[in-house]
Image (cartoon, rainbow, N blue to C red):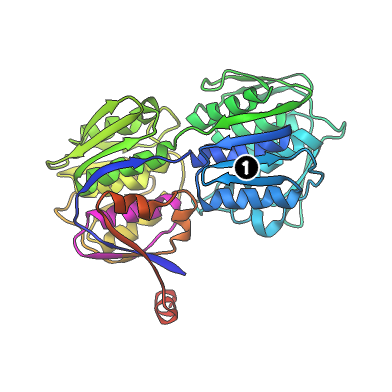
Protein backbone atom coordinates (compact mmCIF):
# COMPACT_ATOMS: atom_id res chain seq x y z
CA UNK A 1 0.00 0.00 0.00
CA UNK A 2 1.27 3.43 -0.91
CA UNK A 3 0.32 7.06 -0.43
CA UNK A 4 1.18 10.44 -1.94
CA UNK A 5 3.06 12.91 0.24
CA UNK A 6 2.89 16.52 -0.96
CA UNK A 7 4.70 19.51 0.51
CA UNK A 8 2.52 22.26 -0.90
CA UNK A 9 2.60 25.97 -1.44
CA UNK A 10 4.86 25.89 -4.50
CA UNK A 11 3.64 27.47 -7.79
CA UNK A 12 3.83 25.21 -10.85
CA UNK A 13 6.05 26.08 -13.81
CA UNK A 14 6.99 24.27 -17.03
CA UNK A 15 5.34 22.01 -19.59
CA UNK A 16 3.26 18.85 -19.27
CA UNK A 17 2.21 16.29 -21.89
CA UNK A 18 -1.39 15.08 -21.68
CA UNK A 19 -1.97 11.35 -22.13
CA UNK A 20 -4.69 9.57 -24.08
CA UNK A 21 -8.26 9.87 -22.85
CA UNK A 22 -9.23 7.33 -20.19
CA UNK A 23 -12.92 7.55 -21.06
CA UNK A 24 -12.17 6.80 -24.72
CA UNK A 25 -9.59 4.08 -24.09
CA UNK A 26 -11.83 1.98 -21.84
CA UNK A 27 -14.41 1.75 -24.66
CA UNK A 28 -12.05 1.52 -27.66
CA UNK A 29 -10.08 -1.40 -26.22
CA UNK A 30 -13.22 -3.57 -25.76
CA UNK A 31 -14.32 -2.46 -29.23
CA UNK A 32 -11.35 -4.43 -30.61
CA UNK A 33 -13.45 -7.55 -29.87
CA UNK A 34 -15.55 -6.59 -32.91
CA UNK A 35 -12.54 -6.47 -35.26
CA UNK A 36 -11.44 -9.40 -37.42
CA UNK A 37 -7.75 -8.57 -37.56
CA UNK A 38 -5.01 -6.73 -35.71
CA UNK A 39 -5.76 -3.32 -34.16
CA UNK A 40 -2.81 -1.07 -33.41
CA UNK A 41 -4.01 1.47 -30.84
CA UNK A 42 -1.76 4.42 -30.02
CA UNK A 43 -1.82 7.12 -27.32
CA UNK A 44 -3.11 4.58 -24.78
CA UNK A 45 -2.88 5.95 -21.22
CA UNK A 46 -0.81 3.96 -18.73
CA UNK A 47 -3.50 3.64 -16.05
CA UNK A 48 -4.88 0.77 -13.99
CA UNK A 49 -8.28 0.76 -15.77
CA UNK A 50 -6.49 0.06 -19.05
CA UNK A 51 -4.42 -2.70 -17.42
CA UNK A 52 -7.63 -4.33 -16.17
CA UNK A 53 -9.32 -4.14 -19.59
CA UNK A 54 -6.26 -5.68 -21.27
CA UNK A 55 -6.24 -8.43 -18.64
CA UNK A 56 -9.89 -9.22 -19.36
CA UNK A 57 -9.22 -9.32 -23.12
CA UNK A 58 -6.33 -11.72 -22.55
CA UNK A 59 -8.57 -13.96 -20.44
CA UNK A 60 -11.12 -14.01 -23.26
CA UNK A 61 -8.41 -15.24 -25.66
CA UNK A 62 -7.17 -12.05 -27.28
CA UNK A 63 -3.54 -11.74 -28.30
CA UNK A 64 -2.34 -8.60 -26.52
CA UNK A 65 1.05 -7.21 -27.54
CA UNK A 66 2.47 -4.19 -25.72
CA UNK A 67 4.57 -2.24 -28.24
CA UNK A 68 5.64 0.57 -25.90
CA UNK A 69 4.21 2.62 -23.00
CA UNK A 70 1.50 4.16 -25.17
CA UNK A 71 0.92 1.63 -27.97
CA UNK A 72 -0.75 -1.78 -27.92
CA UNK A 73 -1.66 -4.29 -30.63
CA UNK A 74 -4.79 -6.40 -30.16
CA UNK A 75 -5.79 -9.44 -32.19
CA UNK A 76 -9.20 -10.66 -31.05
CA UNK A 77 -9.87 -12.88 -34.09
CA UNK A 78 -9.43 -16.07 -32.04
CA UNK A 79 -11.54 -15.01 -29.06
CA UNK A 80 -14.22 -17.63 -28.44
CA UNK A 81 -15.29 -16.94 -24.84
CA UNK A 82 -18.19 -14.71 -23.84
CA UNK A 83 -17.81 -15.09 -20.07
CA UNK A 84 -15.97 -12.23 -18.32
CA UNK A 85 -14.22 -13.08 -15.01
CA UNK A 86 -16.12 -11.73 -12.02
CA UNK A 87 -13.08 -10.63 -10.02
CA UNK A 88 -11.71 -8.49 -12.88
CA UNK A 89 -14.97 -6.94 -14.08
CA UNK A 90 -16.02 -5.86 -10.58
CA UNK A 91 -12.96 -3.63 -10.27
CA UNK A 92 -13.87 -1.34 -13.15
CA UNK A 93 -16.95 0.63 -14.18
CA UNK A 94 -16.17 0.38 -17.89
CA UNK A 95 -16.50 -3.42 -17.86
CA UNK A 96 -20.05 -2.87 -19.09
CA UNK A 97 -18.66 -2.07 -22.56
CA UNK A 98 -17.78 -5.75 -22.80
CA UNK A 99 -21.50 -6.54 -22.88
CA UNK A 100 -22.06 -4.49 -26.02
CA UNK A 101 -18.89 -5.72 -27.72
CA UNK A 102 -19.43 -9.43 -26.97
CA UNK A 103 -23.14 -9.24 -27.75
CA UNK A 104 -22.41 -7.47 -31.03
CA UNK A 105 -19.85 -10.03 -32.15
CA UNK A 106 -21.18 -13.32 -30.75
CA UNK A 107 -24.83 -12.59 -30.03
CA UNK A 108 -24.09 -13.59 -26.44
CA UNK A 109 -22.46 -12.04 -23.36
CA UNK A 110 -22.03 -13.02 -19.71
CA UNK A 111 -20.63 -10.08 -17.74
CA UNK A 112 -20.86 -9.15 -14.03
CA UNK A 113 -22.40 -5.78 -13.16
CA UNK A 114 -19.78 -3.02 -13.27
CA UNK A 115 -17.67 -1.88 -10.33
CA UNK A 116 -15.46 1.21 -10.10
CA UNK A 117 -15.99 4.34 -8.00
CA UNK A 118 -19.02 4.73 -5.76
CA UNK A 119 -20.78 7.84 -7.08
CA UNK A 120 -24.22 6.85 -5.89
CA UNK A 121 -26.88 4.99 -7.83
CA UNK A 122 -25.56 4.42 -11.36
CA UNK A 123 -27.95 1.96 -13.03
CA UNK A 124 -27.26 0.52 -16.46
CA UNK A 125 -30.96 0.24 -17.29
CA UNK A 126 -30.54 2.41 -20.41
CA UNK A 127 -27.81 0.09 -21.68
CA UNK A 128 -30.06 -2.94 -21.19
CA UNK A 129 -33.01 -1.11 -22.75
CA UNK A 130 -30.90 -0.53 -25.85
CA UNK A 131 -29.79 -4.15 -26.07
CA UNK A 132 -33.41 -5.27 -25.72
CA UNK A 133 -34.47 -2.92 -28.52
CA UNK A 134 -31.89 -4.63 -30.75
CA UNK A 135 -33.44 -8.03 -30.07
CA UNK A 136 -31.46 -9.26 -27.07
CA UNK A 137 -32.98 -11.16 -24.18
CA UNK A 138 -31.60 -10.03 -20.81
CA UNK A 139 -31.43 -11.89 -17.50
CA UNK A 140 -29.60 -11.04 -14.28
CA UNK A 141 -28.78 -14.14 -12.25
CA UNK A 142 -26.07 -15.27 -9.82
CA UNK A 143 -24.24 -11.97 -10.01
CA UNK A 144 -24.05 -11.93 -13.82
CA UNK A 145 -25.81 -10.12 -16.65
CA UNK A 146 -26.76 -12.64 -19.35
CA UNK A 147 -27.55 -11.17 -22.75
CA UNK A 148 -28.48 -13.36 -25.73
CA UNK A 149 -29.65 -12.56 -29.26
CA UNK A 150 -32.03 -15.48 -30.03
CA UNK A 151 -31.31 -15.19 -33.78
CA UNK A 152 -27.58 -15.24 -33.13
CA UNK A 153 -27.21 -11.67 -34.39
CA UNK A 154 -28.69 -8.40 -33.21
CA UNK A 155 -31.20 -6.55 -35.37
CA UNK A 156 -30.94 -2.81 -36.00
CA UNK A 157 -33.78 -0.75 -34.52
CA UNK A 158 -34.61 2.72 -33.15
CA UNK A 159 -33.41 3.16 -29.56
CA UNK A 160 -35.01 5.96 -27.53
CA UNK A 161 -33.15 6.65 -24.29
CA UNK A 162 -35.04 8.00 -21.28
CA UNK A 163 -32.05 10.13 -20.28
CA UNK A 164 -28.89 11.25 -22.03
CA UNK A 165 -26.33 8.61 -21.05
CA UNK A 166 -22.70 8.55 -22.20
CA UNK A 167 -22.17 4.91 -21.27
CA UNK A 168 -25.42 3.71 -22.85
CA UNK A 169 -24.75 5.67 -26.05
CA UNK A 170 -21.33 4.07 -26.45
CA UNK A 171 -22.46 0.59 -25.44
CA UNK A 172 -25.35 0.58 -27.91
CA UNK A 173 -22.96 1.79 -30.63
CA UNK A 174 -20.75 -1.22 -29.92
CA UNK A 175 -23.65 -3.66 -30.00
CA UNK A 176 -25.14 -2.19 -33.20
CA UNK A 177 -21.94 -2.04 -35.28
CA UNK A 178 -22.30 -5.63 -36.56
CA UNK A 179 -26.12 -5.83 -36.28
CA UNK A 180 -28.39 -6.41 -39.27
CA UNK A 181 -29.90 -3.13 -40.48
CA UNK A 182 -29.98 0.42 -39.14
CA UNK A 183 -29.88 1.48 -35.50
CA UNK A 184 -30.80 5.03 -34.48
CA UNK A 185 -29.92 6.28 -30.98
CA UNK A 186 -31.67 9.35 -29.62
CA UNK A 187 -31.16 11.41 -27.60
CA UNK A 188 -27.49 10.48 -27.85
CA UNK A 189 -24.76 11.89 -25.62
CA UNK A 190 -22.21 14.12 -27.40
CA UNK A 191 -18.99 13.85 -25.37
CA UNK A 192 -15.63 13.84 -27.23
CA UNK A 193 -14.96 10.21 -26.31
CA UNK A 194 -18.19 9.18 -28.04
CA UNK A 195 -16.92 10.78 -31.24
CA UNK A 196 -13.56 9.05 -30.70
CA UNK A 197 -15.19 5.62 -30.37
CA UNK A 198 -17.20 6.23 -33.55
CA UNK A 199 -14.06 7.35 -35.39
CA UNK A 200 -12.20 4.24 -34.23
CA UNK A 201 -14.99 1.92 -35.38
CA UNK A 202 -15.37 3.76 -38.70
CA UNK A 203 -11.63 3.47 -39.32
CA UNK A 204 -12.04 -0.30 -38.98
CA UNK A 205 -14.93 -0.41 -41.47
CA UNK A 206 -18.04 0.49 -39.45
CA UNK A 207 -20.75 2.82 -40.78
CA UNK A 208 -21.60 5.29 -38.00
CA UNK A 209 -22.99 8.77 -38.64
CA UNK A 210 -23.91 11.65 -36.34
CA UNK A 211 -21.51 11.07 -33.44
CA UNK A 212 -21.24 14.38 -31.59
CA UNK A 213 -24.90 15.19 -32.25
CA UNK A 214 -28.01 14.05 -30.40
CA UNK A 215 -28.92 11.52 -33.12
CA UNK A 216 -26.49 8.73 -34.02
CA UNK A 217 -27.17 6.34 -36.88
CA UNK A 218 -25.36 3.01 -37.15
CA UNK A 219 -25.74 0.95 -40.30
CA UNK A 220 -24.63 -2.56 -39.40
CA UNK A 221 -21.79 -4.12 -41.42
CA UNK A 222 -20.80 -7.77 -41.84
CA UNK A 223 -17.29 -7.44 -40.39
CA UNK A 224 -14.61 -5.00 -39.31
CA UNK A 225 -11.00 -5.11 -40.50
CA UNK A 226 -7.81 -4.31 -38.62
CA UNK A 227 -5.99 -1.00 -38.71
CA UNK A 228 -4.27 1.70 -36.65
CA UNK A 229 -5.84 4.39 -34.51
CA UNK A 230 -4.66 7.04 -32.04
CA UNK A 231 -6.83 7.90 -29.01
CA UNK A 232 -7.68 11.56 -28.40
CA UNK A 233 -6.02 13.49 -25.54
CA UNK A 234 -7.65 13.35 -22.12
CA UNK A 235 -9.89 16.38 -21.54
CA UNK A 236 -10.17 15.68 -17.81
CA UNK A 237 -6.46 15.18 -17.20
CA UNK A 238 -5.80 18.48 -18.98
CA UNK A 239 -8.52 20.16 -16.93
CA UNK A 240 -7.02 18.79 -13.73
CA UNK A 241 -3.64 20.36 -14.54
CA UNK A 242 -5.41 23.63 -15.41
CA UNK A 243 -7.14 23.72 -12.02
CA UNK A 244 -3.85 22.80 -10.31
CA UNK A 245 -2.31 25.95 -11.78
CA UNK A 246 -5.39 27.93 -10.74
CA UNK A 247 -5.13 26.68 -7.15
CA UNK A 248 -1.34 26.66 -6.67
CA UNK A 249 -0.40 29.53 -9.00
CA UNK A 250 2.34 29.64 -11.63
CA UNK A 251 2.43 29.17 -15.39
CA UNK A 252 2.22 25.84 -17.24
CA UNK A 253 2.08 24.96 -20.92
CA UNK A 254 -0.29 22.01 -21.35
CA UNK A 255 0.63 20.12 -24.52
CA UNK A 256 -1.18 17.50 -26.63
CA UNK A 257 -4.74 18.69 -26.21
CA UNK A 258 -7.71 19.60 -28.40
CA UNK A 259 -8.48 23.19 -27.30
CA UNK A 260 -12.12 22.99 -28.41
CA UNK A 261 -12.70 20.16 -25.93
CA UNK A 262 -11.37 22.41 -23.17
CA UNK A 263 -13.67 25.39 -23.80
CA UNK A 264 -16.18 24.45 -21.09
CA UNK A 265 -13.39 24.30 -18.49
CA UNK A 266 -11.42 27.26 -19.82
CA UNK A 267 -14.48 29.54 -19.64
CA UNK A 268 -14.94 28.95 -15.90
CA UNK A 269 -11.28 29.40 -15.06
CA UNK A 270 -11.15 32.66 -17.01
CA UNK A 271 -14.19 33.86 -15.01
CA UNK A 272 -12.11 33.17 -11.90
CA UNK A 273 -9.20 35.31 -13.07
CA UNK A 274 -6.98 32.64 -14.59
CA UNK A 275 -5.26 33.54 -17.87
CA UNK A 276 -5.59 30.90 -20.59
CA UNK A 277 -3.84 31.32 -23.94
CA UNK A 278 -4.32 28.95 -26.88
CA UNK A 279 -1.24 27.98 -28.91
CA UNK A 280 -1.98 25.31 -31.52
CA UNK A 281 -2.55 22.01 -29.72
CA UNK A 282 -1.50 23.52 -26.40
CA UNK A 283 -2.87 25.84 -23.73
CA UNK A 284 -0.73 28.17 -21.62
CA UNK A 285 -2.36 28.55 -18.21
CA UNK A 286 -1.24 31.31 -15.86
CA UNK A 287 -2.39 32.49 -12.44
CA UNK A 288 -0.57 35.25 -10.61
CA UNK A 289 -3.30 37.25 -8.87
CA UNK A 290 -6.20 36.32 -6.61
CA UNK A 291 -9.03 34.05 -7.71
CA UNK A 292 -12.58 35.39 -7.85
CA UNK A 293 -15.82 33.56 -7.18
CA UNK A 294 -18.02 31.94 -9.80
CA UNK A 295 -20.89 29.47 -10.06
CA UNK A 296 -20.52 26.02 -11.61
CA UNK A 297 -23.18 23.55 -12.72
CA UNK A 298 -22.18 20.19 -14.17
CA UNK A 299 -24.00 19.22 -17.35
CA UNK A 300 -23.61 16.85 -20.31
CA UNK A 301 -21.11 18.01 -22.95
CA UNK A 302 -20.62 20.75 -24.06
CA UNK A 303 -21.46 21.82 -20.51
CA UNK A 304 -19.05 21.74 -17.57
CA UNK A 305 -18.06 18.07 -17.03
CA UNK A 306 -19.02 16.26 -13.84
CA UNK A 307 -15.55 14.69 -13.87
CA UNK A 308 -14.10 18.19 -13.21
CA UNK A 309 -16.49 19.03 -10.36
CA UNK A 310 -14.24 18.19 -7.40
CA UNK A 311 -11.07 19.67 -8.93
CA UNK A 312 -12.57 23.08 -9.62
CA UNK A 313 -14.14 23.00 -6.16
CA UNK A 314 -10.61 23.14 -4.71
CA UNK A 315 -9.86 26.30 -6.68
CA UNK A 316 -13.17 27.83 -5.56
CA UNK A 317 -12.19 27.13 -1.94
CA UNK A 318 -9.36 29.64 -2.47
CA UNK A 319 -11.39 32.23 -4.41
CA UNK A 320 -12.58 35.49 -2.88
CA UNK A 321 -16.30 35.48 -2.17
CA UNK A 322 -19.06 32.86 -2.24
CA UNK A 323 -19.36 30.32 -5.03
CA UNK A 324 -22.17 27.88 -5.79
CA UNK A 325 -21.59 24.38 -7.20
CA UNK A 326 -24.56 22.41 -8.55
CA UNK A 327 -23.99 18.74 -9.37
CA UNK A 328 -26.37 17.74 -12.14
CA UNK A 329 -25.15 14.18 -12.82
CA UNK A 330 -24.11 12.03 -9.81
CA UNK A 331 -25.46 11.88 -6.26
CA UNK A 332 -22.23 11.02 -4.44
CA UNK A 333 -19.82 13.56 -5.92
CA UNK A 334 -19.74 15.27 -2.51
CA UNK A 335 -17.75 12.63 -0.62
CA UNK A 336 -14.59 14.71 -1.09
CA UNK A 337 -16.06 17.61 0.93
CA UNK A 338 -15.20 16.14 4.34
CA UNK A 339 -11.62 15.64 3.18
CA UNK A 340 -11.31 19.27 2.06
CA UNK A 341 -12.76 20.43 5.37
CA UNK A 342 -9.83 18.69 7.09
CA UNK A 343 -7.65 21.10 5.12
CA UNK A 344 -9.58 24.19 6.19
CA UNK A 345 -12.14 24.50 3.39
CA UNK A 346 -15.51 26.11 4.13
CA UNK A 347 -18.13 24.14 2.16
CA UNK A 348 -21.78 23.48 3.01
CA UNK A 349 -23.73 20.91 1.00
CA UNK A 350 -27.50 20.71 0.65
CA UNK A 351 -28.70 18.05 -1.75
CA UNK A 352 -27.15 18.68 -5.14
CA UNK A 353 -25.93 22.18 -4.26
CA UNK A 354 -22.85 23.32 -2.35
CA UNK A 355 -22.02 26.78 -1.06
CA UNK A 356 -18.29 27.45 -1.02
CA UNK A 357 -16.94 30.34 1.06
CA UNK A 358 -13.43 31.19 -0.06
CA UNK A 359 -10.62 30.97 2.51
CA UNK A 360 -7.18 32.56 2.38
CA UNK A 361 -5.27 29.30 2.72
CA UNK A 362 -5.67 25.54 2.87
CA UNK A 363 -3.40 23.63 5.22
CA UNK A 364 -1.90 20.18 4.77
CA UNK A 365 -3.62 17.21 6.43
CA UNK A 366 -3.98 13.42 6.13
CA UNK A 367 -6.79 12.77 3.61
CA UNK A 368 -8.17 9.95 1.48
CA UNK A 369 -9.08 9.65 -2.17
CA UNK A 370 -12.74 8.61 -2.02
CA UNK A 371 -13.00 8.11 -5.78
CA UNK A 372 -10.98 8.84 -8.92
CA UNK A 373 -11.77 12.54 -9.41
CA UNK A 374 -12.00 13.25 -5.68
CA UNK A 375 -8.50 11.82 -5.44
CA UNK A 376 -7.34 14.23 -8.13
CA UNK A 377 -8.93 17.04 -6.13
CA UNK A 378 -6.92 16.00 -3.06
CA UNK A 379 -3.76 16.24 -5.14
CA UNK A 380 -4.72 19.75 -6.33
CA UNK A 381 -5.51 20.76 -2.76
CA UNK A 382 -2.21 19.38 -1.51
CA UNK A 383 -0.30 21.36 -4.13
CA UNK A 384 -2.01 24.59 -3.06
CA UNK A 385 -1.95 24.02 0.70
CA UNK A 386 0.70 25.12 3.17
CA UNK A 387 2.45 22.26 4.92
CA UNK A 388 2.31 18.54 4.19
CA UNK A 389 -0.64 16.60 2.77
CA UNK A 390 -0.71 12.80 2.81
CA UNK A 391 -3.20 11.13 0.47
CA UNK A 392 -4.17 7.49 0.98
CA UNK A 393 -6.24 5.13 -1.23
CA UNK A 394 -4.32 6.39 -4.25
CA UNK A 395 -5.38 3.33 -6.27
CA UNK A 396 -8.43 5.41 -7.18
CA UNK A 397 -6.21 8.12 -8.68
CA UNK A 398 -4.18 5.57 -10.64
CA UNK A 399 -7.36 4.40 -12.34
CA UNK A 400 -7.37 7.53 -14.48
CA UNK A 401 -4.09 9.49 -14.23
CA UNK A 402 -0.98 8.42 -16.11
CA UNK A 403 2.24 9.03 -14.17
CA UNK A 404 0.82 11.96 -12.21
CA UNK A 405 3.67 12.07 -9.68
CA UNK A 406 6.37 12.32 -12.36
CA UNK A 407 4.42 14.91 -14.36
CA UNK A 408 3.85 17.15 -11.35
CA UNK A 409 7.44 16.76 -10.16
CA UNK A 410 8.66 18.09 -13.50
CA UNK A 411 6.50 21.18 -12.87
CA UNK A 412 8.28 21.85 -9.60
CA UNK A 413 5.82 20.18 -7.23
CA UNK A 414 7.19 18.46 -4.13
CA UNK A 415 5.26 15.18 -4.42
CA UNK A 416 6.39 11.64 -3.69
CA UNK A 417 4.84 8.21 -3.55
CA UNK A 418 5.71 6.41 -0.32
CA UNK A 419 4.89 3.04 1.16
CA UNK A 420 2.46 2.97 4.06
CA UNK A 421 3.96 1.13 7.01
CA UNK A 422 1.71 -1.55 8.51
CA UNK A 423 1.19 0.33 11.76
CA UNK A 424 0.24 3.49 9.80
CA UNK A 425 -2.26 1.52 7.77
CA UNK A 426 -3.86 0.06 10.89
CA UNK A 427 -4.11 3.52 12.43
CA UNK A 428 -5.77 5.02 9.35
CA UNK A 429 -8.07 2.00 8.96
CA UNK A 430 -9.14 2.18 12.61
Query: Does 414 appear above or below 146?
Result: below
Of 124 and 275, the residue lying toward us: 275
Of 384 and 217, the residue lying toward us: 384
Q: Quadrant of residue 172?
A: top right
Of 306 and 422, the residue lying toward us: 422
Residue 38 seen: yes
Residue 393 in magenta? no
For mark 1, give the secondary structure.
Answer: loop
Q: Residue at x 44, y 38 (%)?
A: 234
Is 312 on the left or on the right of 182, as rendered?
left
Residue 372 in magenta? yes
Per the rendered image, the range of residues in magenta is: 367-389
Q: Residue at x 24, y 64 (%)?
A: 364
Which residue ends up furthest to the front in the rendered image?
A: 67
Q: Quadrant of residue 175?
A: top right
Q: Quadrant of residue 303?
A: top left
Q: Which residue is mark 1?
A: 124
Q: Residue at x 13, y 42 (%)?
A: 290
Amino acid sequence: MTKYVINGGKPLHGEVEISGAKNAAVAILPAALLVDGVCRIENVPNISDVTLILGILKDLGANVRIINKTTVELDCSKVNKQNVPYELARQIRASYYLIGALLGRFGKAEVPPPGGCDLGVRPIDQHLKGFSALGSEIQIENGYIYAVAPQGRLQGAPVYLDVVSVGATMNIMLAATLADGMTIIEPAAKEPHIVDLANFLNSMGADIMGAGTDVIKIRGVKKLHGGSYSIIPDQIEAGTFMTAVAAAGGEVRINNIIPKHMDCITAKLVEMGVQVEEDGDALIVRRTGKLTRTNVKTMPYPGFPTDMHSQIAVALCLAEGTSIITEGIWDNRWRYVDELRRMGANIQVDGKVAVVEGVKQLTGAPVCATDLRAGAAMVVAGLAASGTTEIEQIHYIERGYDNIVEKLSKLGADIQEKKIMEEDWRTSAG
